[in-house]
Amino acid sequence: MKTWNFTQRAGSLFQFLMLLFMVSVAVFLLLELIPGDPVDALLPPDASPEQITAARDAYGLNDPLLQRYFSWMGGVLHGDFGRSYQTGVSVGESIMERLPVSLELALVSIILALVIAIPTAVWSAYRPGGIVDRVTTIISSAMLATPSFVLGIVLIFVFAMTLNIFPPMGWVPFSEDPIAHIEKLILPVVTLAASEIVLFIRILKGDMMTTLQQDHVLSARARGLPTWRILSGHALKQSSFSLVTVSGMVIGRLIGGTILVEAIFSLPGLGTLAINGIHSRDYVVVQAVVLVCAVGYILINALVDLTYPLLDPRVRKERTS
């Protein structure tokens, strides 16, 4: 049994490392295939061929493709993502400055979505066709038809421009002014959380309705256990597999997928950094942002997989048998 577990874990580790390697290759080659040259954005339009060649030599752009990849990957493994073509600033420092913004935005949005979605989905599954279920269905249909960037613009117009309750855009670090930080965080968080709430409710409600019809839940009802205990202890825990999986995927996606929201609310996150890098053909910045987001996505989903035995002991038994 121990030999099997060691082999299984070694195989999982090998697959994980191979996935990271393929991601790094894909990120590097993807930007290599994009038309255009970073040097074009650095030099004036009337630059001579000698100046272009000298600039490409200075940034190592004339080196063979494999040499550039291994040079870039060697730096990444040592925490060095290179320096921006435009500003000369360390890309790693820029990412570390902006990552907390995107990470906070994603995590707070997920927490808000789960806080609203879990009780709503549980009650809708317990009382299908009830008032909560009908209202949730109507709101969900409306939210599914509304893109995030449209919702963000509507929220700015209503709560910032018309009612003047929240500031329309910008960012204030928590260390400088906690109140202003929270005020500027509310609208972007609601914008991101809205669509995830609908997704979480639909997933958890469907699983809960199936679980509530299983024998052990019906037996708990027959024994006269309180409804709250049946829903939370017997049904919710077993129905959370899909929700946990999707939550992990959503967190990874939101860390690098908040580009439109960051642009609308002028937030200094990874999305804004990537957009600026694309506009200025600062490919080393774009490569670093995409790689960090991709690796974060993979790590989060790996951690999600480790939580399954905590939700259902049967998974732990299957893995150890």
Image (tube, rainbow, N blue to C red):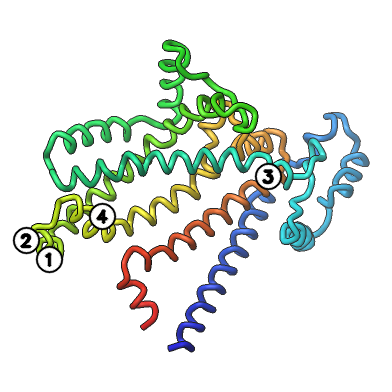
Label 4 packing within 10 angstroms: few (<14), some (14-19), many (20+): many
Considering the image in quadrants, where does the N terminus appear?
bottom left
Q: 308 above or below 284?
A: below
In the image, residue 231 above or below residue 39: below
Q: Which mark is residue 96?
A: 3
* Nearer-N-terminus badge (4/2): 2
Query: How far separated are the C-alphas under marks 4 and 3?
Result: 37 Å
Note whether 158 is above or below 2 in the view shown: above
Element under disc 2:
helix
Q: As shown in the figure, which amino acid type bears the numbered disc 4?
A: Leu
Give the number of callouts: 4
Closest to the observer, 16 or 68:
16
| Picture disc at residue 222 | 2
Task: Give the residue displayed 34% in from the left and 77% down from the top.
Answer: 317
Residue in front for this viewpoint, 68 or 174: 174
The kind of residue tagged 1 is Asp
How far is the residue under mark 1 from the one under mark 2?
Answer: 10 Å
Q: What amino acid does circle 3 point to?
A: Met
Are the residues tagged 4 and 3 within 8 Å (C-beta)?
no
Give me the C-alpha separation between circle 3 and circle 2: 55 Å
Report the disc number at residue 119. Answer: none
Residue 236 - label: 4
